[in-house]
Amino acid sequence: QVQLVESGGGLVQAGGSLSVSCAASGRTFSSYAMGWFRQAPGKEREFVASISRSGSGTKYADAVNGRFTISRDNAKNTVYLQMRTLKPEDTAVYYCAARRAPYYYIGVEYDYWGQGTQVTVSS
């Protein structure tokens, strides 16, 4: 069992930056590929970014590529999402997820999900 707890969300102006983190419980964090997803009101949950279990491979949604960076620290059981040049359309609840697999993954078939953290970008 893996428990995921996101933190770091908040309110930021358009053009600003924000970082969110996801802390995982357990001693097998390095066995999991990790992903970030987001869900805006009235919309489906969508893929944002994913990272392989080693951290060597990453994948981004087109909408955030070049603005967001996913990273992980296996010693700290934590995955990060650094967000820059934020836009109002980035406003959503951001979720982290864990998938017991070596490679990054863009689908929603993850094994564990966090409770989410709200990111709001004002115009």
Image (cartoon, helix red, strand yellow):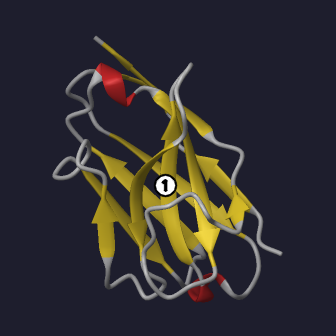
Q: Secondary structure at mark 1?
A: strand
Residue at image position (26%, 26%) is 87
Q: Where is residue 97? Give x, y as percent.
A: 60, 61
Left or right position of 30 against 64: right
Name the residue type under label 1. Answer: Trp
Q: Which residue is mark 1?
A: 36
- The image shows residue 71, relative to residue 101, as above or below, that is above
Q: Residues within 10 Å of mark 1 (few under 14, many from 20)?
A: many
Q: Where is residue 35? Give x, y as percent.
A: 50, 62
| Farthest left residue in view | 66
Image quarter of the N terminus: bottom right
Residue at image position (69%, 53%) is 114
Q: Where is residue 56? Give x, y as percent.
A: 32, 85
Classify residue 117 by image quadrant: top right
Classify residue 23 by image quadrant: bottom right
Classify residue 121 by image quadrant: top left
Image quarter of the C terminus: top left
- The image shows residue 93, relative to residue 3, as above or below, that is above
Closer to the camera in the image, 25 or 54: 54
| Farthest top residue in view | 123
Closer to the camera in the image, 70 or 23: 70
Residue at image position (64%, 42%) is 116
Q: How many marks?
A: 1
Residue at image position (61%, 64%) is 109
Q: Where is residue 106? Give x, y as percent.
A: 43, 63
Left or right position of 81 against 16: right
Left or right position of 76 against 63: right
Closer to the camera in the image, 1 or 16: 1
